[in-house]
Amino acid sequence: MTVYNRDGMVATIQVNGDVRPLTRGETVRSLLASFNLKPEKVAIEINKRLIRAADYDKDLIEGDVVEIVTFVGGG
Amino acid sequence: MGNDTFRIRDYEIVNRLIVGTGKYADYDIMRDALDASGCHVVTVAVRRERLVDKQGRSLLDFLDLKRYTILPNTAGCFTAGDAIRVALLGRDLLEKQGNRGAGWVKLEVLGDKKTLLPDPIGTLEATKELVKEGFTVLCYSSDDPIAARRLKEAGAASVMPAGSPIGSGQGVLNPLNISLCLETLKDGDPNYPVIVDAGVGTASDVTIAMELGADGVLLNTGIAHAKDPVKMARAMKLALESGRLSYQAGRIPKKRYATASSPFEGVISYIPGE
């Protein structure tokens, strides 16, 4: 269910640079599941702060900027 | 080479070649090249997960995490703050994998995209912060011996001067500066680890770095973009062993004039000037 903010606008979050509507009860864990990603294969940042796995079940809030990262080839 | 290892804090480096995982044509070639190189430590980068058009093949599926110690880098970071964020993310990922690389980071704070040369001030700032965070920091640096000394003083577990710009294949452009870095960093602390990082184009570049007295060499493009990466990986391995042995054996001093290998005593020939 989409969340509306105080102004009656659709509340949004940003995930890896893309803006998307915030659904009620959305957490890091549910977000990862929706992308078919295993929590142990990624690391998560919200608003430029590392989020540890113990906090993956906390609700996301409007305006959260989420980064989902993994390892790629590099030197 | 037997037990010719060295240490970076808690990490015992069994093979002195550290190889990157970037820029291979595919993961299968990467895996075979890493195997041929004999390396035990491989570098990786931290990037956004692809949320759409994901092909399903991930780097982690092609790296044997029991065999390799993963050294996450902060490549692509241009500020100390971003490098710290990326280092924390890399550590979290490796902790989840149970890989022993979770304690260290290859720190890169870059000055600009064109040269990819390190920002000395940003690198120094990030080193101090990451040391506070408990990281074993391996610092990508320029070949400036004074910058290298400052990084060591800030707590870097290893300073890694660049032979030449990243991916340039120009080899060790300034052997004098690399040897000055080695002299400065190892003064009174001979076991302080110094790794030549970046710029290797071909096998002889690795030998030169090792002959100068480096503890190891870190490279990526020289193997990944060779016509035959697996064969080049083997060449790099042999070159490293050659350079290391040569350094240990001790080269002869350079002389201005020739010195005959066959004795002049007893010659039956005419000698000019005598």
Image (cartoon, coloured by chain):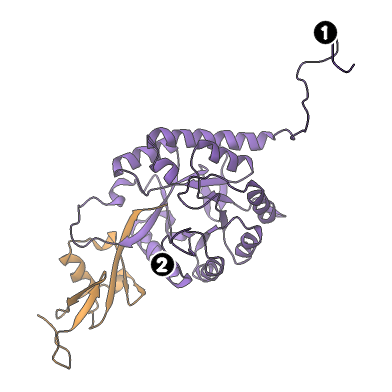
Chain colours: A orange, B purple
Q: Nearer the viewer, mark 1 or mark 2?
A: 1
On screen, residue B19 above or below B188:
above
Q: Chain of mark 1?
A: B
Residue B88 is marked as 2
Q: Residue at x 25, y 78 (%)?
A: A58
The one nearer the camera, B93 or B33, is: B33
Residue B16 is marked as none
Q: Amino acid at mark 1?
A: Ser
Return the disc, 1 or 2, that comes first in the chain's sequence: 2
On screen, residue B242 above or below B45:
above
- Left or right of B173: which side holds A50? left
Q: Amino acid at mark 2?
A: Leu
Q: Circle 1 is placed at which residue position?
A: B269
Q: Is residue B6 visible?
A: yes
- Left or right of B180: which side holds B232? left
Q: Position of residue B81 (x, y in %)?
A: 45, 72
Mark 2 secondary-structure assignment? helix
Q: Residue at x 41, y 35 (%)?
A: B36
Mark 1 secondary-structure assignment? loop
Q: Position of residue A48 (x, y in %)?
A: 36, 75
Quarter where residue A3 is shown: bottom left
- Alpha-carbon neighbours of circle 1 within 10 Å: few (<14), some, or many (≥20)? few
On screen, residue B233 above or below A74:
above
Q: Chain of mark 2?
A: B
The one nearer the camera, A28 or B59, is: B59
Figure quadrant of the C terminus of chain B: top right
Give the distance between the C-alpha atoms of the residues marked 1 and 2, in whole angstroms: 74 Å
Quarter where residue B251 is shown: top right
Residue found at the very far right of the displayed protein: B274
